[in-house]
C-alpha cells in the first residue's frame, strides 16, 4: 500500500485515551503512520502512549523542539518509545521559532549549528558509546532510531541530506518541495551517501468541505497564524508569494488579525494546502506524490465539526489514497 500518514494533534483538548483511540483508528484504516506535533504537550510522551496502544503503524514526532530537551534526555525518551513500539518509531527534530523561544527566555543562536550538534550528540548516545564528560553510557536500542529534520529552509534540507535519515517538509507547493528534495539528496551524494537514504515526508494541511469557498476561508484564517512567524513567512515568500508574505507580516506587526487573513490570496492558499471537496483534496495529494512526496502527512483542520469527527472523516477519504 502507498504510504500516507496523519498528524494527530494532542493539543485539541481531548483526553489522552481518546487521542490514542484515534491513532488506533488510523492504524485500522490502513494509514502508514501517525505523527505527533508539539506545542503545549510532550510529543515523546504522546508517542509512547500511541506505541503502547497500537501494533503496526509507524509513530513519529512531528517535531520535538531541540531547545526544550538536552540531547541525552531526548535520546533516553526516544529509546524508550522505540522499545515499546518494537522499532516503529521515527524521531523528528526541529528548532521551533525564535519568538516562541524568546517568550520562554531561550536564546536561539545559530539554529542550524545547534541542530547539527544535537544530532551528533544523539547519535553518540544512541550508539551505546560513553557520553563525553559524563562517564555513563546508554543501552543501544535493538533497532536504530531514524532521525528526520524539519526543513523549511533549503540550507536545512541540505543539512538533512548530510546527517539525517529523512526530511519533514511543510507548507511547500509541489515545486518548492521538489527543489528541497533535490537539495537534500544532492548534498547526500556530496557526502558519500545514496539519495534514497534520505526519506521524504510532506505535511499537508487539509481543509475539507464540499463548499469550496468555506474551505478556502477556513484555510485563510489558519494559515495567517503561520504567516506571522518569521520562518514560515520567509518560506511563503520564497515559494512565490512575496506580496502576500509582506502584507501578512506588516499586518501582524499591527496585531491586525483581519488584515493578516485578508493578505492571503486564494492561489496561495490553494498552493499551500488541500482545500475544498474530497475530490479536490485527493487531486492535490496526487500532485504531491508525483513531485516526490514519499510519505504525505495529512493534517486535519476541522470546519464546523469537532476534531475527532474531522479526523474520522479524513481517515475515510484518505485510507485508500
Image (cartoon, rainbow, N blue to C red):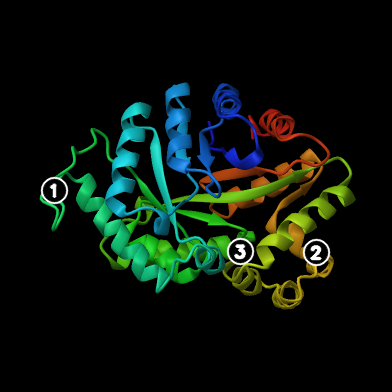
Mark 3 or mark 2, earlier in chain:
3
Q: CA distance from mark 3 to mark 2?
A: 24 Å
The answer to the question of whether label 3 and label 2 lie on touching residues, with beta carbons closer than 8 A, is no
Residue density around tag 3, few if under 14, some if 14–19, many if 20 or more, within 10 Å: some
> What is the residue that sits farthest to the front in this orientation?
105
Residue nearer the viewer, 165 or 79? 79
Q: Which residue is mark 1?
A: 129
Q: Position of residue 131 (x, y in %)?
A: 16, 52
Single out the mark in the foreground, 1 or 3: 1
Q: Position of residue 127 (x, y in %)?
A: 19, 46
Q: Position of residue 47 (x, y in %)?
A: 45, 35
Q: Which residue is mark 3?
A: 175
Residue nearer the viewer, 166 or 47? 47
Mark 1 or mark 3, earlier in chain:
1
Q: Considering the numbered disc 2 on the image, is that residue within a helix, a strand or a loop? A: helix
The picture quadrant where one finds residue 266 is bottom right
Q: Considering the numbered disc 1 on the image, is that residue within a helix, a strand or a loop? A: loop
* Image point (23%, 33%), residue name: 142
* Image point (31%, 30%), residue name: 83
Q: CA distance from mark 1 to mark 3?
A: 41 Å
Q: CA distance from mark 2 to mark 1?
A: 50 Å
Residue nearer the viewer, 66 or 4? 66
Residue 271's disc number: none
Residue nearer the viewer, 247 or 316? 247
Residue 9 visible somewhere in the drawing = no
Q: Which residue is mark 2?
A: 261
Compared with residue 125, is residue 314 higher up or lower down, i.e. above or below? above
* Image point (47%, 22%), residue name: 53
Amino acid at each position: 500500500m502507498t504510504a500516507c500518514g496523519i498528524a494527530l494533534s494532542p493539543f485539541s483538548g481531548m483526553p489522552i485515551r481518546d487521542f490514542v483511540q484515534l491513532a488506533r483508528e488510523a492504524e485500522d484504516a490502513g494509514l502508514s503512520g501517525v505523527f505527533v506535533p508539539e506545542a503545549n504537550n510532550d510529543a515523546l510522551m504522546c508517542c509512547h502512549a500511541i506505541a503502547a496502544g497500537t501494533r503496526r503503524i509507524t509513530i513519529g514526532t512531528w517535531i520535538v523542539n531541540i531547545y526544550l530537551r538536552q540531547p541525552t534526555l531526548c535520546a533516553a525518551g526516544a529509546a524508550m518509545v522505540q522499545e515499546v513500539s518494537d522499532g516503529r518509531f521515527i524521531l523528528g527534530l526541529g528548532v521551533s521559532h525564535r519568538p516562541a523561544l524568546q517568550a520562554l527566555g531561550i536564546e536561539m543562536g545559530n539554529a542550524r549549528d545547534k541542530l547539527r550538534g544535537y544530532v551528533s550528540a544523539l547519535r553518540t548516545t544512541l550508539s551505546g558509546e560513553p557520553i563525553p564528560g559524563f562517564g555513563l553510557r546508554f543501552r543501544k536500542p535493538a533497532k536504530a532510531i531514524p532521525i528526520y529534520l524539519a526543513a523549511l529552509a533549503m540550507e536545512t534540507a541540505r543539512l538533512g541530506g548530510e546527517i539525517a535519515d529523512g526530511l519533514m517538509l511543510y507548507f511547500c507547493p509541489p515545486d518548492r518541495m521538489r527543489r528541497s528534495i533535490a537539495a537534500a539528496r544532492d548534498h547526500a551524494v556530496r557526502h558519500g551517501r545514496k539519495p534514497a537514504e534520505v526519506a521524504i515526508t510532506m505535511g499537508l494541511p487539509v481543509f475539507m468541505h464540499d463548499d469550496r469557498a468555506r474551505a478556502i476561508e477556513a484555510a485563510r484564517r489558519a494559515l495567517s497564524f503561520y504567516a506571522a512567524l518569521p520562518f514560515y513567512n520567509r518560506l511563503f515568500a520564497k515559494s512565490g508569494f512575496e506580496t502576500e508574505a509582506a502584507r501578512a507580516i506588516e499586518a501582524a506587526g499591527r496585531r491586525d488579525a483581519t488584515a493578516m487573513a485578508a493578505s492571503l490570496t486564494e492561489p496561495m492558499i490553494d498552493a499551500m494546502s488541500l482545500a475544498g471537496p474530497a475530490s479536490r483534496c485527493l487531486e492535490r495529494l496526487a500532485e504531491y506524490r508525483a513531485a516526490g512526496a514519499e510519505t504525505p502527512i495529512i493534517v486535519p483542520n476541522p470546519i464546523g465539526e469537532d476534531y475527532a469527527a474531522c479526523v474520522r472523516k479524513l481517515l475515510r477519504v484518505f485510507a485508500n489514497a
